[in-house]
């Protein structure tokens, strides 16, 4: 039930070829708690690691609509790989958009490095005990000549098993005018960076989202991409992070649930149960839930493409992004719960992919923006209540 144009279908077909291969490896990485390095070899060879790089630089030139479709289709085969590659693809897409507006030589160099396979990215911003809303950080940035020394420990370092570089948030406590949150670019092999093997979770095990420690890591001034007042909602963060990350998370979890639905239909059809009204009711409800998520994602793409998302105010924009992720995440978990009714005891079998998909989807509701935070910002916005000061520098 997809209405795609020829370009979108081409990208989905490319992702589908890989997703089917990844599905055959997913159980191994889930069982052994290992990162799918072979999947990244395949992604590189197919060109999908350069999915968002402009064509004139050697990439595939995909826009937001195509990127979200690719992530969903990859997740139908292996949610962990799709989520990991999301952390690389989204920053690259953001750079491409900024480069088209500014012609930045630095961004062009980074985009070409991605196209040539010399750079893989990760976003490392989460910290235990703090909401991952990009308004503050415990990690400290201390001013030194030419830059900063960054010290702190981050959790949920998705994609750091293979990444060459990452973005890190850190707090400059002593900045003129008050504390700032810095968005820093760090090479993962530079002195002071250490990855701790902490990842042993219920689901999304193949992401290997381990802790990353930074001890007096030097970040030159030119590697600080953005500075915002601590505790503020920020217009640039809305445009470059939330507008991309939240629909992408929705797309990934929609894909995992769609993969489970496809598997369920094939299993039940093989047993001749497709004519059972109870089965049809369950399948119909799940399909409707997925289409609802896709409709919101599609609306979001249009609001970003036209710029309308950035004209309604920063808090309203963040709230609208949160709605997309919230609906996608919760619809995906509801799909899995509903399918258990017709899959039955097979949903509990480790030898079958359904239980892995069920476990992977459970991460959806607490990934940023988590359910509670999403409801609070949506509710406050609807009630006309500011949740934080706004920094509107674009």
Image (tube, helix red, strand yellow):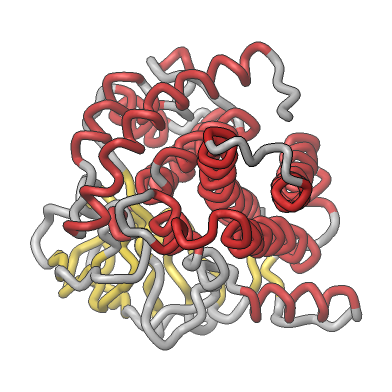
Q: Residue at x 27, y 20 (%)?
A: 45
Percent position of residue 128, x then y:
37, 83
Q: Residue furthest left?
A: 191
The number of numbered discs placed on residues in the rendered structure image is 0
- Quadrant in the rendering for residue 377: bottom right
Q: Is residue 191 above or below residue 372?
A: above
The front one of 62 and 142 is 62
Q: Residue furthest bottom?
A: 129
The quarter of the rendered structure image containing the N terminus is: top right
Percent position of residue 252, x then y:
53, 48
User: Is 119 positioned to the left or the right of 76 in the image?
Assistant: left
- Quadrant in the rendering for residue 43: top left
User: Is 216 positioned to the left or the right of 247 in the image?
Assistant: left
Q: Residue at x 64, y 75 (%)?
A: 371
The front one of 206 and 246 is 206
The answer to whether any part of residue 300 appears in the image is: no
User: Is 198 positioned to the left or the right of 102 in the image?
Assistant: left
Q: Residue at x 70, y 48 (%)?
A: 279
User: Is 184 positioned to the left or the right of 287 in the image?
Assistant: left
Percent position of residue 72, x then y:
54, 39
């Amino acid at each position: 039930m997809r209405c795609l144009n020829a370009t979108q279908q081409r990208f989905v077909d490319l992702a589908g070829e890989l997703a089917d291969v990844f599905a055959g490896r997913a159980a191994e990485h889930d069982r052994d708690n290992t990162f799918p390095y072979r999947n990244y070899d395949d992604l590189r060879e197919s060109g999908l690691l350069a999915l968002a790089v402009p064509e004139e630089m050697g990439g595939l030139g995909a826009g937001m609509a195509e990127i979200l479709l690719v992530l969903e289709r990859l997740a139908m085969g292996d949610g962990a790989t799709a989520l990991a590659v999301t952390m690389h693809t989204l920053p690259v897409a953001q750079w491409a958009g900024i480069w088209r507006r500014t012609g930045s030589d630095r961004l062009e160099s980074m985009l070409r490095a991605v196209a040539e396979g010399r750079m893989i990215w990760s976003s490392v911003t989460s910290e235990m005990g703090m909401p991952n809303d990009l308004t503050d950080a415990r990690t400290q940035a201390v001013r030194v000549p030419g830059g900063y020394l960054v010290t702190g420990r981050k959790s949920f370092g998705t994609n750091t098993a293979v990444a060459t570089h990452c973005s890190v948030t850190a707090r400059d406590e002593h900045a003129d005018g008050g504390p700032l949150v810095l968005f820093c670019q760090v090479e993962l092999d530079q002195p002071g960076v250490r990855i701790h093997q902490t990842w042993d979770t219920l689901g999304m095990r193949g992401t290997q989202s381990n802790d990353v420690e930074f001890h007096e890591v030097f970040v030159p001034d030119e590697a600080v991409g953005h500075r915002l007042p601590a505790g503020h909602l920020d217009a640039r963060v809305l445009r470059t992070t939330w507008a991309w990350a939240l629909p992408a998370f929705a797309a990934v979890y929609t894909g995992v649930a769609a993969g489970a639905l496809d598997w369920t239909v094939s299993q039940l059809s093989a047993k001749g149960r497709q004519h059972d009204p109870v089965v049809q009711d369950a399948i119909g409800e799940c399909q409707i839930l997925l289409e609802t998520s896709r409709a919101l994602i599609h609306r979001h793409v249009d609001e970003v493409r036209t710029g309308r998302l950035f004209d309604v105010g920063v808090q309203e924009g963040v709230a609208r992004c949160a709605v997309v992720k919230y609906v996608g995440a919760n619809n995906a978990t509801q799909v899995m719960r509903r399918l258990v009714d017709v899959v039955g005891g097979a949903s509990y079998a480790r030898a079958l992919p359904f239980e892995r998909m069920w476990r992977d989807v459970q991460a959806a509701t607490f990934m940023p923006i988590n359910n509670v935070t999403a409801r609070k910002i949506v509710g406050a916005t609807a009630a006309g209540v500011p949740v934080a000061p706004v920094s509107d520098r674009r």
